[in-house]
Image (tube, grey):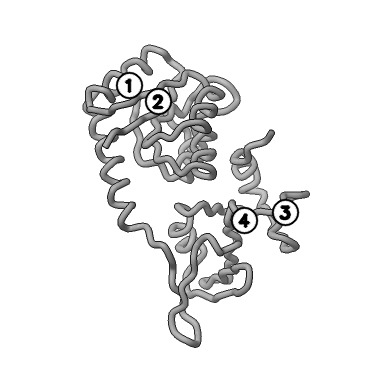
Amino acid sequence: MEKSVLVVEDEPLIADDLSFYLKDLGIDHVDVSLKYDDAMDKLSKNSFDLALLDVNLSGEQDGIHLANFINNKLSTPFIFITSYYDRETLDRAKKTNPYGYILKPFDKQDIYVNVEMAFHKMTLNAYQKPDKFFVKDKEGLTPIDPADILYVEAFDNYAKVFTGDYSYIVSHTLKSIENKLVPFGFDRVHKSYLINFAKISRISEGYIFFGEIAIPIGRAYKTEFLSKLSLL
């Protein structure tokens, strides 16, 4: 099967090296973007099997902003490339669930290992990602499609899962549920709330709405959440 990879790197010489290593690895189609806007355009118009994202792009938007766009709109797997991490950047990067990290300066073996591992992980995820989750209720185990969940609210060591028609109490922490639902497009927006990004009806004055239901955006989560929004 042919594979395609997008390289987003603002240093042309490094971008050329990455492109060469990927083609040497047997990647059929390698596309390169030197700028954030060009990368956004290519991601919106084309389908890629993998993206290599330089974290420290020049300009206001960086590779982590691209990663957030990918998670919310495309679900394309990606690997970060970076020369350094400060604590704030590392925390932002971890939340996007990358398939790997490549540290500069790198050699072709670093690229081979990370790319091969990423494609291996994709293959495993294709088999392991569940279509439904099951929750206990009075009747036994009830299946829930992740796409039907609006949001999840924390109650101490328990959580309440809300769909359009029902709510379910589960004996897990919100963090535990977050780890399972993030791959399905969910996002933590408050210490007590996890929301389904695809189900948002509007955002207004510090609240996310699902119809008439208002969920507060926590101060510690606001900047990161707003950076994920694609504005016209």
Q: CA distance from mark 1 to mark 4?
A: 37 Å
Which disc number belongs to residue 18?
1
**182 relative to 174, above or below:** above
What numbered label is drawn on residue 7?
2
- Label located before the other in sequence (2 or 4): 2
Q: Of marks 3 and 2, which one's residue comes earlier in the chain?
A: 2
Q: Secondary structure at mark 4?
A: helix
- Element assignment for label 3: strand
Judging depth in this view, the residue of 98 and 90 nearest the camera is 98
Name the residue located 25 percent from the left edge and 37 percent from the top edge: 116
Q: Which residue is mark 3?
A: 207
**Whole-number angstrom distance, CA of label 1 to CA of label 2:** 7 Å
Could you give the CA–CA distance between mark 3 and mark 4, rounded to whole angstroms?
14 Å
The residue labelled by disc 4 is: 199
What is the secondary structure assignment of the residue under circle 1?
Answer: helix
In front: label 3 or label 1: 1
- N-terminal of the two: label 3 or label 1? 1
Q: Position of residue 40 (x, y in %)?
A: 53, 29
Q: Which residue is at the far bottom?
A: 138
Question: Is residue 36 left or right of 127 when viewed as pictured?
Answer: right
The residue at the far front in this view is 1
Q: Crowdedness of circle 1 by 10 Å Cα count: few (<14), some, many (20+)?
A: many
Return the residue found at the far top: 13
Residue type, numbered disc 2 = Val
Task: Give the residue drawn at x 57%, y 64%.
Answer: 152
Other-residue count near label 3 (Cα within 10 Å), few / some / many at <14 / 14–19 / ≥20: some
